[in-house]
Amino acid sequence: APMIQQWVHGVKTLAAVATRFPQTAYAGMATSLQAEWQYVCRVVPGIAKDLAPVEEAIRSVFLPALFGGTTPMTIDDNFRRLLGHSVKKGGIGIRDPTRVADRLFQASKEATALLAETL
């Protein structure tokens, strides 16, 4: 999947930026790159497993760069889950695409059901 590899590359590029400009990298991830794959999640059923390389890049490259700069760090499951929460709930809003993909698709399907039925 070439698009998934582009997103992995984008995550790694933002990680490189994050060591010097963390706010810029965070803004790029939260408002642009994440929005791209969330759109795909809303329209393509069953894509969650295909997004595993994106989540791996977020967890192992982007988040350590964002929080640790050049210091190596590991993001465990509990910390990763916390970071996926909205800012209002104590996270940073960088969601795990493998965990939210099915929910996004279902929400989109339910939201458009009436319109789809009338066509």
Image: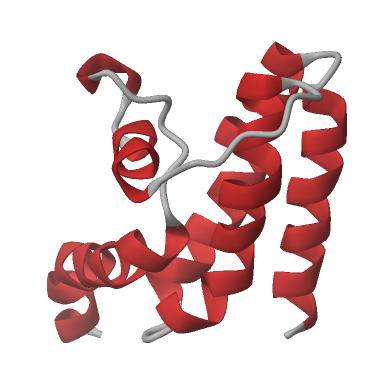
- Residue 7, compared with residue 63, is above or below; it is below
Q: Quadrant of the N terminus?
A: bottom right
- Which quadrant holds the C terminus? bottom left
> What is the count of numbered marks?
0
The image quarter containing residue 114 is bottom left
Relative to 93, is 19 on the left or the right? right
- Residue 76 locus on image (x, y percent): 41, 45
The one nearer the camera, 110 or 28, is 28
> Which one is in front, 85 or 47?
85
Q: Is residue 58 above or below residue 7?
A: above
Q: Along the horizontal axis of the image, is 118 left or right of 68?
A: left
Residue 21 screen position, x and y as percent: 81, 14
Q: Is residue 25 above or below residue 21?
A: below
Q: Residue at the spot x=38%, y=86% of the render?
A: 46
Indicate left or right for 65 with 60 as reference.
right
Residue 34, image x and y in percent?
57, 47
Q: Residue at x 24, y 65 (%)?
A: 103
Locate residue 57, reporting x and y percent: 67, 56
Residue 37 lies in quadrant:
bottom right
Give residue 104's quadrant in the image: bottom left
